Image (cartoon, rainbow, N blue to C red):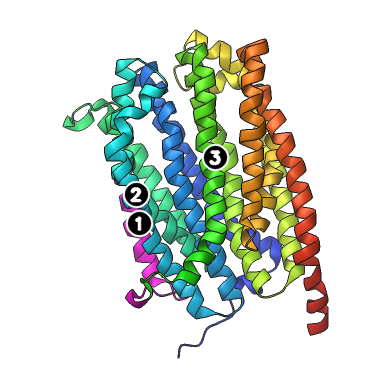
Amino acid sequence: MQQRTENKMGILPIPRLVMVMSIPIMISMLVQALYNVVDSIFVAKVSENALAAVSLAFPIQNLVIAVAVGTSIGVNSLLSRSLGAKNYEDAEKAANNGIVLGFLSWAVFAVLGLTLSKYFFTLFSDNVALQAMGSQYILVCLVFSLGIFIDVTCERILQATGDTIHPMIIQGTGAILNIILDPILIFGWFGFPALGVLGAAIATVFSQHVSACMAVYYVRKNKEVQIKTSFFKLEKRIVLSIYAVGIPTIIMQAIGTVMVMGLNKIIIAYGISAIAVLGVYFKLQSFIFMPIFGLNTGMIPVIGFNYGAKKPKRITQTVKVGLFVSVLIMIIGTAIFMLCPRFLLSWFDASPDMLAIGIVAFPRISLCFISAGICIVLGSLFQAIGDGYISMIISITRQMIFLIPAAYILGRLFGLDAIWFSFIIAELSSFLLTLLFFKSDYKKKIKPLFALEDAQQ
């Protein structure tokens, strides 16, 4: 039997380990954020209707990502905890079952794309051109979504074993390829037909499938886990363990879909320009939030591994390092959105109406960035130790109990400019809940491990 060496997540100094695990993911997510922004910049050059169509399609894309990321985080959490406990059979079952679950998830979304895509945009607008562009975009993104499910699952498998370099290469390659293909297919360069919004969708799914092929290749070469057809058969115990973390994460991110749809429904009453501004905001804020999510992704296997290995000091050190980095990034992000809204909007050929709305919206929303970053980092602890339902509760409370009702009430009473304060109200509730749950989890699950660690020493 092959001798296994000690995993770096159990022995490297924590500050160095968090950076080694997180920086490659943060870089790859920044490249992904760059793609999101560049994609919208190109689409904005087609028309404001095209930008609004893609903005309205964002919640559906987010739902696909929610299922892919949620399931893969469940795989990541179980796999890293199993490696920490030296339960290598369960680690490999987690990886293999996760790939099968990715295929099954894709099949569901492909059917939804074929049956429902042409009806979705009628919920928001009677603009025929907008409906046609949006329906084409969503149809392609859903029917050909297999690439994103396989890509995300395999990347999380690699990250759970401590490999963050190859996921960076995979995601970076896909994003750069997407950026290259966007103008070629949208505007019809080099003899290709000008496909507009449809071209953006084709560029997206093609790049995702290239990334998926690379991800499968690197997983098959990974020494910590092996892809075995004997483990492709879904095992109830493994699937339940994956979804114990995965389902709350899926719900948490899917609530984001409902939230954006709700905001779109409220804000579209103020015109297409208002919808375009909201869509641009979500694209731009990904530059700030993607590195934090990369930090979160890098922390989950570190915390999970050391939780399985019963090393609480390494867990608390990981959280402290994560909080420091998160707050630093969010201070920079807040300053950019506060001081440069006009410059940011100019990237998207913003109309005078868009500028008037955006220079008010961006500074107000950015006031909640720092508290949001703290919540994301503490959420990595909940997910890593198997308490993903906590993040779900916080997310539902933030978005459905506070954000949407506050946006509706503020809009009705004071108009569009007041709606942006609803983000601050919602984030304050999230921050307070996160601190309460963190205190409870620390007392119940982390603090008792210190006695075990001291006894072993």
Q: Is residue 390 magenta?
A: no
- Find out whether the residues at labels 3 and 2 contact each other: C-beta distance under 8 Å: no
Indicate which disc, 3 or 2, sits on the residue closer to the N terminus: 2
> Would you place residue 262 above or below residue 49 in this image?
below
> Would you place residue 252 above or below residue 309 in this image?
above
313 on left or right of 383: right
Q: Which residue is mark 1?
A: 104
Assign a secondary structure to mark 2.
helix
Q: CA distance from mark 2 to mark 1?
A: 7 Å
Three-letter amino acid code of the residue under disc 1: Leu
Indicate which disc, 3 or 1, sits on the residue closer to the N terminus: 1
The magenta-colored residue range is 206-230
Q: Position of residue 140 (x, y in %)?
A: 28, 38
Three-letter amino acid code of the residue under disc 2: Val
Q: Which residue is mark 3?
A: 255
Q: Position of residue 423 (x, y in %)?
A: 66, 29
- Find out whether the residues at labels 2 and 1 contact each other: C-beta distance under 8 Å: yes
- The image quadrant that residue 113 belongs to is top left
Q: Position of residue 356 (x, y in %)?
A: 57, 11
Q: Position of residue 245 (x, y in %)?
A: 57, 58
Please, which residue is most extreme toward the left here?
191
Badge 2 crowding class, 10 Å Cα cut-off, few under 14, some 14 to 19, many 20 or more, is few
* Secondary structure, magenta segment, majority class: helix
Numbered badge on residue 108: 2
> Would you place residue 221 above or below residue 184 in this image?
below
Toward the viewer: 142 or 114? 114
Residue 338 seen by the camera: no
Assign a secondary structure to mark 3.
helix
> Would you place residue 273 above or below residue 387 in this image?
above
Badge 3 crowding class, 10 Å Cα cut-off, few under 14, some 14 to 19, many 20 or more, is many
